Amino acid sequence: MDVANSIKDLSYALDTFYFLMSGALVMWMAAGFSMLEAGLVRAKNTAEILTKNIALFAIACIMYMLMGYGIMYPSDGNGIFPTLDFSFMFGGDNDPAEVLAQDLGTWYDGSYYSGMSDFFFQVVFVATAMSIVSGAVAERMKLWSFLAFAVVMTGFIYPLQGYWKWGGGFLDGLGFNDFAGSGVVHLCGASAALAGVLLLGARKGKYGPSGQVNAIPGANMPLATLGTFILWLGWFGFNGGSELIISNVAEANAVAAVFVNTNAAAAGGVIAALITAQLLFGKADLTMALNGALAGLVAITAEPLAPSPLWATLVGGIGGVLVVFAIITMDKLKVDDPVGAISVHGIVGMWGLLAVPLSNGDATFLAQITGLVTIAAWTFTASYATWFVIKMIWGIRVSAEEEYEGVDVGECGLEAYPEFTNK
C-alpha cells in the first residue's frame, strides 16, 4: 500500500472511531435522562419513568433503522419530501476500494467515515429527542400510550424535520444553522412534549382552585444531580461528535473548541440560574441550578464552534436566566411539566437558535427564525394529532386511583422503593 492510501486508511479509521465513541457518549445521555427524571418524580412513579426511558431507547433504535434514517438521509428529495429508501435495514457500508480511490488532495472536502458509524451517531440523537418527552408527561401518562407515540415520533415526526436541515432539505438551503441540534433535537422534543402535556392535563393537586401552584418535590435529588452530570459529560459527544471528523489539525482544533465552549456554556448556565433563583426566591434552588446547566448546554448546541469561550459562557448564562423564568411562567399558565423539559429544551432551544448570528457571520436571523418556527410548528402539529388519535383509541391518562397510588404499581406491577414509598 502506498503512502497516500496509508494516510487515507488511518484517517478513515480514526474518524470512524471518533464518531462511534461520540455516539457512545450520547447513548450514555440516556442514563442521564433516566437518573434526572427518576430524581425529579415522586418515589411511587420511579420504576415507570425508568421503564419509559429504556423502552423508548429501544424503540428509537428499531424505528430509526426501519424508517427514520431513510427519511432523514435519503438518496434524493425535493427539499420538503424525501425520496423514500429503507434499504439501510439490510446492512452495507462504504466499499474499501472506492474509499481508497478518492483523491487525497480533496479528501477533507468531504467526511470519510463508516456509514454504519453515521447511523449509530444519528440514532442516539433521535433517542435523545424522545427522552425529552418522557419527563414532561411523567406521573400521569399511560406507559403503552407513551410508547405508541414513541414509534411515530422516532420513525416519522423527528426524521422528517431532521431531513429539512441535516438531510439537505429546504431549511438547509435557506441557510438555517443548527450545528448539533438546539432546534432539530431539543426544540423538536420540547414541541412534542408540549402537545402531549396540553392534551394530558396537569397532575392532581398541582394547581389549586384559586390559581395557586403547589410544589410537588422530587424523590431523590442526588439522583437528579447525578443525571445532570451524566448529561453534561454526554454532551461532549453530542456537540463534539457533530464536528464529524478529527483527523487533521484544523478539525482537531475545532473539536477542542467545541468541547471548551460546551463546558463553558454549562458552567454559565449553572451560575446564572443559581443567582436568579436566589434573587427571586431567596434560596439557592438546586433544581434550578440543575436545569441551568442543561439550559446552558441546550443554548450552545446550535453553535458551539464559532463563539469564544467567554461568549459561550454568556450564551449559556442567558439560557440559565431564561429557564428559571420559563419554568415559573409555565406554572402560571398551568402547563405541568414535572422536570422542566419544555422550558429547558424548548424555550432555551429557541434562544440557542437565535443566538447563532451573534457569533456566526454566515447566519441570518431570518433563516434562524424560519427554522425555529418550522420545526416547532411541524412537530407540535404532528405530535398533537398523534397524541389525539392515541387518546381516542386507548386513552393517554391513567385513572385517578392509579395516579394516587403511583403508576409504578398500576403500570409496572412493582415499586422502585418498596420499603420507603410514601404515597
Image: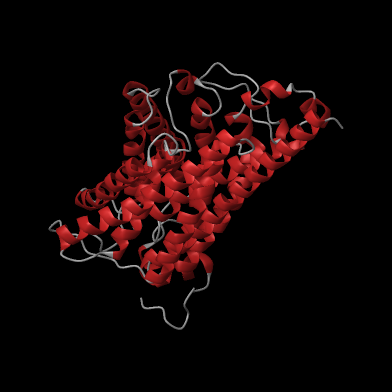
Q: Is residue 149 left or right of residue 342?
A: right
Q: Position of residue 4 (x, y in %)?
A: 78, 28
94 up-or-down from 60: above or below? above
Using the image, determine if residue 315 lies above or below residue 131. Answer: above
Where residue 17 appears, x then y in whole percent? 68, 45
337 sits to left or right of 28: left
Q: How is the image coloured?
A: secondary structure
Name the image quarter holding residue 187: top left
Compare residues 328 and 112 and report the one nearer the observer. 112
Q: How many callouts does the rendering have?
A: 0
Residue lying farthest to the top in this orientation:
78
> Can you name the residue that lies furthest to the bottom here?
419
The x and y percentages for residue 53 are 52, 57
Q: Is residue 150 visible?
A: no
Dividing the picture into quarters, in which one does residue 220 lie?
Answer: bottom left
Residue occupying the point 63% across, 49% down: 21
Please report the residue visible at 25 percent of the width from the left and 48 percent of the height from the top: 326
Horizontally, residue 135 falls left or right of residue 204, namely right
**Residue at far left of view:** 210
From the image, which quarter does the C terminus lie in?
Answer: bottom left
Q: Nearer the viewer, residue 230 or 267?
A: 267
- At x 19% / y 51%, what residue is drawn? 332
Q: Position of residue 393 (x, y in %)?
A: 48, 45
Looking at the picture, tell me which residue is in the foreground, 61 or 260: 260
Residue furthest toward the right? 1
* As drawn, 75 above or below 319: above
Q: Which image quadrant: the N terminus? A: top right
Residue 78 visible somewhere in the drawing: yes
In this rendering, would 23 be left or right of 421? right
Q: Residue at x 39, y 45 (%)?
A: 298
